[in-house]
């Protein structure tokens, strides 16, 4: 399979400083750029602020061990040259940028190459505030390119992820969380826009002996937007049965609304079945007692060269009992060069959807 190699040209935008109008002042001051605190990669970042690289970091990743941090790579690279042993996240994976239990983190503007996870923000229990990943080039991650888990707002914007694999491969993994202190209500907002995910490839059985290879996986968001992304070359060639390759996977156990719009997905293949867009509304947490309503819009997507183009399944239940309603609207989607079933579930051959 042809590997897609990209070059990331990073333009670092300097934020403008707001200033008040004053009639006594005749000249407006110039915008002031955020002042950089420079990173020493050999020690964790333990102070809130705007942190920057001033050169490449080779042979280790960077740890963010404080809340309210922006890490600006300034176009530089964080590279595992084969010698890196730190840092590792909770399940033992080597990570390029790791923030394991801190709130309000932003990472932007640079290159991360050669780790198990290119970047991981969050924690199994989730973290608060805004988690933002933007304008990164993430290459050669063995398992996940970008991995983010959080309670509140997650923004994954304008990144390029390429060459993820060969084991348990997901180009981008984004997960919201339910709140056990509020009747397990989920308020997570997941925004995944303008990304390019190329060559997500599994060739060997992973931790569980199998894995559903995914370009983009968005799980448990109360509100999810997946828009204007391009996903190409998502392959699963590992031995075994039941293997899947999915361009976009949306999975939820909670009430949610979602919008999957104007994405382009090309070449999703597997030994088992393949889906361009896979939607799964599964069981609610038994402790949750509120309504289980699902509303979604799937529109303007093009899925090309698959066994199956769009898979939609609904199994909404709490303790085995059907609850709530499911309302998904599909319109203006195109399935092209399909072998097998183009659209599965719901009335998708109407509403301007078409097969080429």
Image (cartoon, helix red, strand yellow):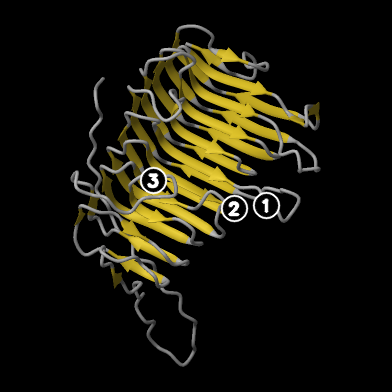
Dot 2: what SS? loop
Q: CA distance from mark 1 to mark 2?
A: 8 Å
Give the image location of residue 337, x and y in percent: 42, 10
Instruction: Return the x and y of residue 15 as percentages of the image width and height.
Output: 38, 67
Query: What residue did someone put label 2 on?
Result: 151
Q: Earlier in the sequence, mark 2 or mark 3?
A: 3
Work out whether residue 58 or residue 335 is closer to the camera in this orientation and state it. 58
The quadrant where residue 231 appears: top left
Looking at the image, which residue is at 36% across and 74% down? 31
Give how far apart the Cα atoms at labels 3 and 1 are: 26 Å
Mark 3 lies on residue: 92
Residue at left 34%, top 72%?
A: 33
Q: Nearer the viewer, residue 153 or 264?
A: 153
Residue 328 relative to residue 268: left or right? right
Q: Are marks 1 and 2 in contact (CB under 8 Å)?
A: yes
Dividing the picture into quadrants, the one containing residue 286 is top right
Tell us which disc is closer to us: 3 or 1: 3
Residue hosting label 1: 179
Q: Secondary structure at mark 3?
A: loop
Q: Is residue 37 above or below residue 53?
A: below
Residue occupying the point 39% across, 51% down: 134
Query: Toward the viewer: 134 or 194?
Result: 134
Residue 67 on image: x %, y %: 47, 66
**Other residues around mark 1 within 10 Å, as few (<14) / some (14–19) / many (≥20):** some
* SS for dot 1: loop
Question: Residue 268, image x and y in percent?
Answer: 41, 20
Q: Which mark is residue 164?
A: none
Compared across the picture, whether 234 is left or right of 152 comes to left
């Amino acid at each position: 399979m042809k590997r897609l190699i990209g070059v990331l040209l990073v333009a670092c935008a300097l934020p403008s400083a707001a200033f008040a109008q004053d009639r006594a002042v005749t000249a407006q001051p110039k915008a002031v750029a955020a002042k950089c605190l420079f990173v020493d990669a050999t020690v964790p970042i333990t102070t809130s602020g705007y942190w920057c690289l001033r050169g490449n970091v080779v042979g280790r990743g960077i740890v963010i061990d404080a809340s309210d941090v922006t890490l600006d790579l300034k176009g530089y690279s964080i590279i595992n040259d084969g010698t890196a042993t730190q840092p590792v996240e909770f399940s033992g994976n080597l990570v390029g940028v790791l923030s394991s239990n801190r709130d309000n983190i932003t990472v932007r503007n640079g290159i991360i190459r050669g780790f198990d996870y290119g970047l991981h923000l969050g924690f199994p229990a989730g973290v608060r505030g805004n988690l933002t990943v933007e304008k990164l080039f993430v290459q050669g991650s063995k398992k996940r390119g970008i991995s983010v888990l959080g309670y509140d707002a997650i923004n994954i914007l304008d990144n390029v992820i390429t060459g993820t694999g060969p084991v348990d491969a997901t180009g981008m993994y984004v997960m919201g969380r339910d709140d056990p202190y509020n009747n397990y209500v989920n308020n997570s907002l997941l925004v995944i826009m303008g990304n390019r995910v190329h060559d997500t490839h599994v060739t060997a059985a992973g931790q569980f002996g199998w894995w559903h290879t995914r370009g983009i996986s968005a799980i448990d968001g109360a509100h999810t937007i997946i828009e204007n992304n391009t996903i190409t070359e998502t392959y699963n060639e590992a031995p075994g049965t039941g293997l899947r390759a999915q361009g976009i996977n949306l999975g939820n156990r909670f009430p949610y609304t979602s919008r999957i719009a104007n994405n382009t997905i090309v070449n999703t293949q597997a030994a088992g079945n393949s889906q361009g867009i896979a939607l799964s509304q599964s069981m609610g947490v038994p402790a949750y007692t509120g309504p289980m309503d699902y509303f979604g819009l799937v529109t303007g997507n093009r899925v090309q060269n698959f066994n199956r183009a769009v898979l939609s399944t609904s199994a909404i239940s709490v303790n085995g009992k059907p609850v709530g309603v499911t309302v998904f609207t599909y319109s203006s989607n195109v399935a092209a060069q399909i072998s097998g079933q183009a659209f599965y579930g719901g009335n998708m051959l109407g509403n301007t959807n078409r097969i080429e």
